[in-house]
Image: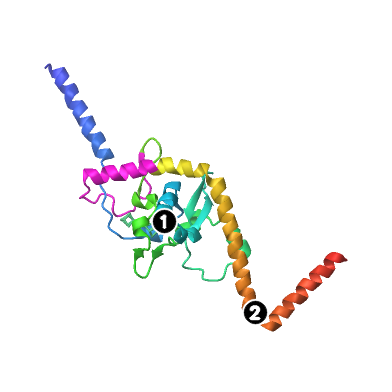
Amino acid sequence: MTEEKKDENNNNQKEKSETEEKTKFTFKCTRCDNCCLKRGPIPITQWDLEIWAKNGVLANFLPYLGIYNNPNGTMDLILKPFSTKDTKKKDVEDIFSQPTIEDLFEEKCPLYNKEDKKCLVYNNRPLSCQTYPLEYNGKNYTIVDNECPGIGQEGMTKEELKLMRDIAQKINYELTRTRISLPVFSQILSQKIMIDLMRQNMEAMSKMSEEDRSKLDEIFKKSESNKEN
Ligand code: SF4
Ligand code: SF4
């Protein structure tokens, strides 16, 4: 082999090992639970819904599902983060209002038990939790949270890496499938919100004192007579 050819080979080897170094991803979850405490909107896919239905736990998740307008214009079915700060009762307008993405990062996952420090649905957790913080955008794998302390931890087997990558790819496909079905989910969820509101109102009415109830009757009567005039 000529000296020129040897140099070319050496350079190729060097470039290859540099590329491998850059793309090397090692990860072991440290169970710090930061991603359950401050995660922002947690996307839910149709695959998650199907698995939950198959395992008979779908009803447990329904109260926590919502639809979120992402800042990039896409919409996703999500687990609605739960505020630990504001314990005040929300009014009707609040129920329909869209929280900002910054607000959501301040709120914990509704299925995380802060006292026991554990996920209440670990064996049925969404795909996006199984592969966090790795995502796949259709072309490349990306890290969505550089502060996750699991990144760079040694001990990941080739099989674990392959599984994580496969799940990341699956989410990318499943999110598209879910977005196509969002109009259907949106209808189901809005009907559920209306039923919840009606139930809340009925519960509130049943706890009212006689005095408050007669005041309410007066208000209704007045508004009816205003309509007639
Ligand atoms: S995925 Fe990362 S942020 Fe989440 S619990 Fe594991 S180490 Fe912590
Ligand atoms: S579903 Fe479980 S793993 Fe996923 S964010 Fe919530 S608590 Fe964490």
- Disc 1 residue lies near ligand 2 with CB under 8 A: yes
Q: Which quadrant of the figure contains the C terminus?
A: bottom right
Precedes in sequence: disc 1 or disc 2:
1
Whether tag 1 and tag 2 are in contact, CB under 8 A, the answer is no
Picture quarter with the N terminus: top left
User: Is 14 located above or below residue 212 in the figure?
Assistant: above
The x, y position of residue 66, in whole percent, is 52, 55
Mark 1 neighbour class, 10 Å CA radius: few under 14, some 14 to 19, many 20 or more: some
Measured along the vertical axis of the image, is residue 96 above or below residue 27? below
Residue found at x 43% / y 43% = 174
Judge by depth and name the residue closer to the eye, 77 or 10: 77
Q: Which amino acid lies under the numbered mark 1 shown in the image of this protein?
A: Arg
- Front-lying residue, 52 or 189: 52
Please name the residue that numbered disc 2 is placed on. Answer: 208
Query: From what the image shows, is residue 47 above or below residue 108?
Result: above
Q: Residue at x 86, y 65 (%)?
A: 228
The x, y position of residue 170, in whole percent, is 38, 42
Identify residue type, mark 2: Met
Determine whether the residue tagged by mark 2 lies in a helix, strand or loop: loop
- Viewer can see residue 106: no
Q: Position of residue 199 (x, y in %)?
A: 60, 68
Mark 1 falls on what kind of element? loop
Q: Which residues are magenta?
A: 141-170
Instruction: Determine the residue positioned at 45% across, 57% down.
Output: 58
Q: Which residue is mark 1?
A: 39
